[in-house]
Amino acid sequence: MILRNVAIRHGRQALAAPLRKSFFRALNTEALTHDTAAIEHSIQNHAKETHSIEATINQLHLTKSFVPPSDEGEPSDEVKQNYAIKQHIKKRTAKLGSIVEKHYEPEALVINPPGPEHVTLELLLASQSHLGHSTSLWNPANQRYIFGVRQGIHIISLEETAAHLRRAAKVVEGVAYHGGLILFVGTRAGQAACVVKAAQLSKGCHLFERWTPGSITNKDQILGKCDIKVVDKDDVEITQGYEEKLEGWTALKPDLVVCLNPLENYIMLHECGLNNIPTIGIVDTDADPTWVTYPIPANDDSLRCVQVIAGVLGRAGEEGQRKRLEVAREGQVTWLPPPGLGKPETEEDKKRAAVKVKKASKPSDEQEQERTRGTRGRRGELDGEDLEL
Amino acid sequence: MLRPTLPRIGRSLGIFRRSLHRVPLLAHEFSKGVPGLLSPSGFDVAWTQYQKLMIDKLNLLTAGQDSIPPKELAIKYARDPAQAPTFNYASMAHNNNFFFSCLTPDPKPMPAWLQTDLEASFSSIETLRREFILTTNAMFGPGFVWLMKTKQRKYAILTTYLAGSPYPAAHYRQQPVDMNTEDKSISEVMRKLNREPPANSVGAHSGGAKTKGLAPGALDAQPILCINTWEHVYLPDYGHGTITGGGKKQFAENWWQAIDWEVVGANAGGPQYAGGTTNRSSFMI
């Protein structure tokens, strides 16, 4: 170590840094050949002189491999490795010391929700899904779901809850399998996390703030500025060929709406009814079961119960999507594109359309001119008259 | 008279809540003792009775709270002197389990990659063994001696007294030295500085550079092996020993023969994380 430092220090004092050719060329705007030649000669002589000193320094093999410590930090893959080791050891030692009994973790319902296969009466009971409202506040239409009365409240039958939940899960899975857009709605405080998770799993949409009235009946005004994309059978976006069509396309409607608190979302459910959109909803003893297509009689006031139901339906949607993509990989497509979408516009189509426009711009016939005026103001959702392909 | 419902009251009345922690299971059946290290009664004292006691105490102290594994509890309460008993029992339960998880009735030779790695840090396995035994012998009082893996894929030995924790997150309760032997008039920072070797005190190789980005006093290393130097572990079988040998020293020597190197290797991350390339900012002298 001492030797090396001495050698380098010696080297530094002995040498001045030789002028590099590249620096010189940068300064020189014109090619002064005689000047450059002279200076290049001197540089070469300089290099020859210093070669002997460099030779003595490089004899110490340590100096060849000397890498001065720098503050740049370690190369990135080393950092990655070290982090991986640390995480590995942490994982190995995390559980040592005792066996912690299985216990209820609230966040687990959102992070890793149960699926339809995990729906048991015990789970529903533990999630307080059987607790209805005071007997004086009931909606008699819910008679069939009520098991009995205890401590002044109606008890919702666990079997009814389980059966209806499983049915709803089947519906969600089916809609997802056939490429439908599912909207999960939960506007009460604390429901945001489970709603978002359920929508993510079933590749649908979520809503956890107030439903803007008219979002379906007046969709082009309220949701007109939302992005739309066209995807193929494997859910890969088709970026070319639909630009023009998408510009004028109408806003989308969901194919299924799952509502976690129907009592606060009457307007939305009414709009769905007007537009033939099936709905699933958690119906408590004081709620009206006719507001939704597929009621799930359960306690809508318990966040744990709502998370279980949202989780189950989200997992069902996930399964439906998985099956859809699986069969799509084998060539089977389980859904139809919306009418009027047609095939993507190729370059040939554009040329043909340009030619047509040119022909139309020639004032040959008045009648022809009138005919070329567009009869369709808006694409998408056609009345059936004008189907191009 | 109304009594407040505190866990202390519950303990005095003999009422226990549902126990959240249970005594963990070891990988091997040691009811007949650890061959070459502990007799059946010695194992009973060191593990069966002691671990049960730690877990029972932990259950009492954490009754009604969230169920957290002992390591997390120790890290959580390392800086909280009001929860010192909880830290102690959680840390002891973890450390004791760690010690017994590294033992095997059927020891096998060290994996080659681990041997290469350790030799790079300790110059030889015999040196490592001696370091361990001498450190164990030198500790006056109960504690643990750990083999730590640092982030530079180097290994080091760390001592923790009593229920001290080797984890960087719980460094506040690392308890690496016997405080009764320290000069309390000097600050903790200065004492730590004086403990370290005098060379390389500036630049990229200094203590300041090594602990860049860490909390003061933290050590960026993870434990992979330990020996339990609490007296109750070796006392029934080895006694105190004499100045020439026996006792704790003999226990440490026997322990070396009973180590499960497969587990240690797995703790260290396996051959995929073995050393090989030298760190860019370090070089051999």
Image (spheres, helix red, strand yellow):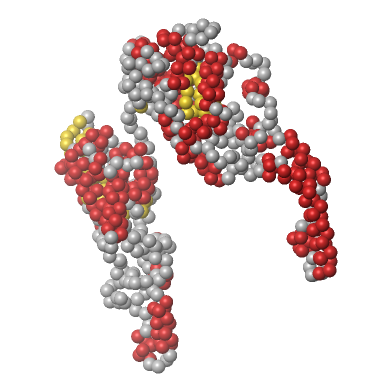
Quick check: A289 above or below A239?
above
Residue shown at 76%/42% (left/top)? A8
Pinpoint residue A55: horizontal percent, then vertical percent.
75, 47
The C terminus of chain A lies in quadrant:
bottom left
Residue A285's spot in the image, x, y percent? 23, 41
User: Which residue is situated farthest in the top direction here?
Assistant: B242
Residue shown at 38% from the left, 82% from the top: A373
Tell me if A227 is positioned left or right of A6 in this view. Answer: left
Query: Relative to residue A149, is residue A365 depicted above or below?
Result: below
Q: Nearer the viewer, residue A111 or A294?
A: A111
The residue depicted at 56 percent of the width and 36 percent of the height is: B152
Q: Measured from the top left, where is residue A241 in percent x and y? A: 40, 71
Left or right: A355 with respect to B194?
left
Using the image as rendered, state which of residue A344 and residue A28 is in the foreground. Answer: A28
Can I make out residue A272 in this image? no
Q: In terms of depth relative to the viewer, which is nearer, B106 or B207?
A: B106
Quadrant of the rendered image containing residue A102? top left
Residues B28 and B142: in front is B28
Q: Where residue A121 appears, x then y in whole percent?
A: 21, 36
Can you see residue B147?
yes
- The quadrant of the image that shows the N terminus of chain A is top right
